[in-house]
Image (cartoon, rainbow, N blue to C red):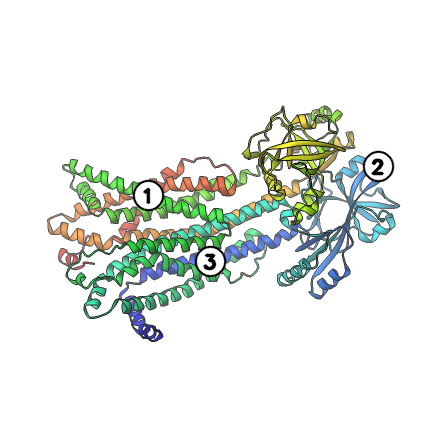
Amino acid sequence: MHGKWLAGIRPGVLALRRDWSSGELRLLLLALVVAIAAVSSVGFLADRVGAALGRDSGQMLGGDIALEADAPIPQSFMEQAGKAGLAYVRTLQFPSMVSGRQGSQLASLKAVAPGYPLRGALRLQGAAAGKEVVVHDVPDLGSVWVDPQILGALGLGLGDSLEVGDSVLKISGIVSYEPDRGMRFINVAPRVLMRIEDVPKTGLIAPGSRVKYGFLVAGESAAVKGYGAWLDGHLERGQKLNTVGSARPEIQKALDRAHQFLVLVALLTVMVAAIAIALAARRFSLRHRDGIAVMRCMGASQSQLSRMLWVEFALLALLASFVGIAIGFAAHLGLVSVVASWLDTSLPASSWTPALQGMATGLVLLLGFALPPLAALRRVAPARVLRRETAMWQPRNGVSYGLGLAAFCILALWFSGDLRMSAIVTAGFVLAFGAFALCAYAGIWALGLLRHRLNGRPALRFALAGMARRKGLVVTQVCALSMGLMVLLLLALTRTDLLQGWQNTVPADAPDTFLINIQPDQRAAVATRLQQGGVASIVLSPMVRGRLVSINRRPVTGSDYAEDRAKRLVDREFNLSYQDQLPSDNRIQSGRWLDSNKNEVSIESGLADALGIKLGDELGFDVAGQTVDVRVSSVREVKWDSFQANFFALLSPRALKDAPTTYITAFRIPAAAPDLVQKLVHEFPNLTVFDVRAILRQVQHVLDQVIQAVQLLFLFTVFAGILVLGAALFSTRDERIQEVALLRSLGASARQLRQAQRVELVLVGVVAGLLAAAGAVAVAWVLADKVFDFELSFPWWPWLGGIVLGVTSASAGGAIALRGVLTTPPLALLREVP
C-alpha cells in the first residue's frame, strides 16, 4: 500500500509542475493563498489585539492577578511570587467611622503598600476644576487621600486633619479614580485611602473586624500564568481570585462584545474564502476533464488518478499554507505599529495558534469545497474523449459538500469558541445560499419567458437567451456574487449599524453618578434639588436589604453549591427592589411581568442560572428578620453596562410594603452644575455618592479601541471578497467562449454581443445586489438580537448599495475576467472547448 502511494508521488509532482506552468492552478492557488493569508492575518492581529485588551484589563483590577481573602495573605503566597520574579503588593479594606469638625461619617478605608497599583494608575483631582493628575505613588505616612464626599460631609478641605480611629491623619489628596474599585457601589461608603503602615496606629483592626485582605501580583505573562496556576491549586476557604468579570462586570461586557466582533470578522473571512475555493476548484475541474479522459484511455486506473490528484493537491495545500501564513504574518506586522498607536498600547507577541488555524483553514477549504469537483475527475469515463456531454455531477458530490460544511462548522467553532455565533453565521449563509439559488432560478426562468416578447432588441434577446440556456451556470454565478456582496454589505452593516448599536448601549447621556441611602422622608427634597440642578429625568428606586434563605421552602446555604459565585450569592445580602413596571433596560427572557396583587419576584438570568432557580419556584427572603415568600414569575435579562440602577431581584410592591426602605437614583451631572453633588452632600450628609465617570470613560475607551481594530480587520475580508467576485466571473468564461463563437459564426456582430454581455452583467448585478442586501440585513438582525444583545434598526441603504455594488462589481469584474472573449476570431473560439 505504501509502495503505491510512494509511486504516486512522482506523477503528482509532475502534474503540479505541468498545471502550474500552464496556469491552470494559479486561480486555485491564489484563492487558497488569499484565504489562508486573510484568516491568518486576521488571526494574528486579533490574537495580539485580544491579548492586549486582556492584558490591559489588568489595569481594571490593579494587577495581573487580584486575590481577595477574609484572613491575612499567607507568607507562602508572597514567597512564591518573589521566586517567580513577580511584583506584588498587599491591601486592606474595611469600614470604619471617620471624624472631622462637623461630625462623623461612615467610610470605606483602604490601606495600600508602596507600589500600588501594579497596573493602571490612581488619579487625583488637580488644582484646576475638571483636571486630573495621574499619580504613581501612595499617600505619605501620616496622610490620606479621600473621596470628595468626605470633604462635603465633614466640612473639610485639603490640608485639614481627619480622625481615623486613634490617629489623626492629614488630607493631602482627593481621589477621582481608583483602578480596582469597580462598580460594586451599593452600601459602599466614601473612600479613605491610606498607607498600610499607618493601620496599626489607628487601632481599628482587632479580632472579629470585617477586613478584606487583598493581594495584587503583576509581571511577565509567562510567569504570571505559572503563578496563577500554582495559586489556583493552593487557594483555601475564604480566598478567591477576582477577574474582570467578577470585579468589573460592566468592563467584562464590553470585552465580551469586543471578542465577538473580532470573531465575526474572522468567520466572515473564512466564509468568503470557501466560496472562492469552490469556484476556483470547479473551473480547474472543468478544464481538466478532457485530459483525464485521455489518461483513462491510455490505461490509467481510478486509483492511480486518485493518488496523483491527492499528491498534487496535498503539495498545493502545503505550499499555499506556507505562503499564505507568511503573507498573513507579514501583513499583520506592517499594521502593528498603526494598531498600537490606535490602541495607545504595545501589542504582545502572538501565539502560533493563528498559524495552525490558517493551515487548518486551507485544509478544510480544499477538502471540503474543492474535493467534490476534483474527486469527480477520477470518475471521468474514457468515453469523454468522444462524448463531451458526459455528466460530471454525482449524488456523492452532495455528500462531499455536506462533509465539507460540517468540517467548516467545526472550524468556525474553533475560531469563535461561541457555538451560538458559529451556528448563526453558518446557518445564515447556508440558508442564504439556498434562498439565493431558488430566487435566481425563478428569476432566470421568468426572464426566459420574457425574451420571446422582445422584438427589435437583439442585444437584450441575446442576453436573456444566453442566461436561459445556461441556467445552472448563471445561478452559480448569481449565488457566488450574492454571497460575496452579502459579506461586504454585512461588513458595512457591522461597521455602521452594528457598531453604532453597540455604542448606543453606552449612550452619551448615560448616568455617571449614583446616590444611595436616600431616606423615605428625603425623597421629595432630593428630587427637588436634582431638578433645580438641571437633572431632567429623575427615577428614585426603592431598595430593601434581604438575604435568600430558602428555595421551594428548603433552606439554602453556601455549602449547597460547588461554584464559588453561587456560594457568594447565597452568603451575601441582596439589594431587593419593587417596581410596578419592567425597567426600560431590562428584558423578560421567560415568564411574565409581576402581578401587583400577588407576592411575586422577577429574577435576573445570571442569578437564576447560578442558583438553579426556575419559573414557578418559591423563594424566601429574610428581610429585617421577617421571611418574605415570593414566587418566581419571570426571568429577566439585565443590561449591567447601561449604568442604570439595576437589581438582581424585583418584587411586587405588595411583598415589600412593610419592609424598611431606602432609595437609590442614577443621573448625569449637568455641565452647568458641576458642584451639584457637593451641595447635595452638604445638605444631606447621610447620602452616599458614587461617581462612575471614570468607569464610564473606561468602557467607552475599550469600545473605541475595538472599533478601530475591527475596522482594520475588515480590509482583509474585503480582499477575499474581491477574489470571490473575480472567481465567479472566471467560472463562466469557458462557456461564454463557446456561446460567443456560435453566435458570431451565425452572424451576430461584435457590437450586439458586447451589448448583450453588458446587459447580462447588469441583470446579474441587480439580482445579486438585491439578494445580498436581503441576506445581509437578515443576518445582521439575527446577530444583533441573538449574539450582541442590542436593537438594530432596519436601514435602507443596503438595498441601494447592494444594487450599485452588484452592477459595478459585475460590470467591472466582467470587463476584466471576460476580456478578449469578444475579440477572438470565431475559428479560434470554436477550438477553445472545455
Q: Which residue is mark 1?
A: 436
Looking at the rendered structure, the number of numbered marks drawn on it comes to 3
- Figure quadrant of residue 691: top right
Q: Is residue 653 visible?
A: yes
Q: Residue furthest left?
A: 746
Q: Is residue 8 above or below residue 156?
A: below
Q: Amino acid at mark 1?
A: Phe
Which quadrant would residue 831 be assigned to in this image?
Answer: bottom left
Q: Secondary structure at mark 1?
A: helix
Q: Earlier in the sequence, mark 2 or mark 1?
A: 2
Work out whether residue 672 can be spotted.
no
Q: Which residue is mark 3?
A: 41
Q: Residue at (51%, 54%) from the top-left corner? A: 46
Q: Position of residue 284 (x, y in %)?
A: 28, 60
Label 1 to label 3: alpha-carbon separation: 30 Å
User: Is residue 109 rendered to the left or right of residue 609?
Assistant: right
